[in-house]
Amino acid sequence: DTEVTQTPKHLVMGMTNKKSLKCEQHMGHRAMYWYKQKAKKPPELMFVYSYEKLSINESVPSRFSPECPNSSLLNLHLHALQPEDSALYLCASSQLGGRDTIYFGEGSWLTVV
Amino acid sequence: SQQGEEDPQALSIQEGENATMNCSYKTSINNLQWYRQNSGRGLVHLILIRSNEREKHSGRLRVTLDTSKKSSSLLITASRAADTASYFCATPHGGSGGSNYKLTFGKGTLLTVNP
């Protein structure tokens, strides 16, 4: 089972709202990732968690707050977002960092109004 | 700057034809991964080829890697309309202890297979 599950699939939120994106994997992977993808662009790395600890933060604005409650779950808390934050947010996981296959979920489409 | 760059940016072919996409990268790599993305969907992993491998097959897919030229190619044989998608190469790098956590994507090739 090589599946990364993301919820919700679509989210519309106002600029003053607080919402969360959720990601789950049951492959026993120790690394989990958040990527952001704008239309017609490649995905860009936001955060990496390794063994439930934040390993990489690619200078992402603080209005995006990641959380890794346990080895299977990864959340992305959203607050005071801007319309330009509208994008596809992809979660991924891997066993050995980039030395192994990195598996992606279907993504969460976020629209900020 | 992008670690990987795909060529061509867009490719349109007829069903049954072969499609070849190329990827160039800049720094030494541990492996190179190819992904497919249907419009508005997530990324599907196709093939991982390691730096000590020259060629790898998976069904109708063939990937080659030339580390001396820092380039890779993805060949899809006997294409089908369902192969219509964007194809990305990606290379892992960075992170502490050689973890290579940062997967950097090329700009992608948009493949259209016409019935």
Image (tube, grey):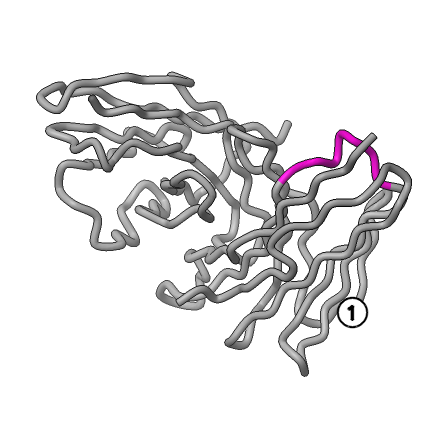
Please tell me which residue lies in front, B42 or A41: A41
Q: Residue B74's spot in the image, x, y percent?
A: 74, 56
Please tell me which residue lies in front, A28 or A41: A41
Chain of the residue under label 1: B
Q: Is residue B84 shown in magenta? A: yes
The image quadrant where one finds the N terminus of chain B is bottom left
B56 relative position to B92: left or right: right
Q: How many marks?
A: 1
Residue extent of the magenta highlight: B79-85
State the image quarter where residue B91 is shown. bottom right
Please tell me which residue lies in front, A102 or B114: B114
**Going 50% across and 60% down the picture, which residue do you hit?**
B92
The image quadrant where one finds the C terminus of chain B is top right
Q: Residue A26's spot in the image, x, y percent?
A: 51, 27
In this view, B70 is above or below A9: below
**Going 44% across and 67% down the picture, which residue do you hit?**
B98
Label 1: which secondary element: loop
Q: Is residue A48 shown in magenta? A: no
State the image quarter where residue B53 is shown. bottom right
Where does label 1 land, which residue? B54
- Residue type at mark 1 is Arg
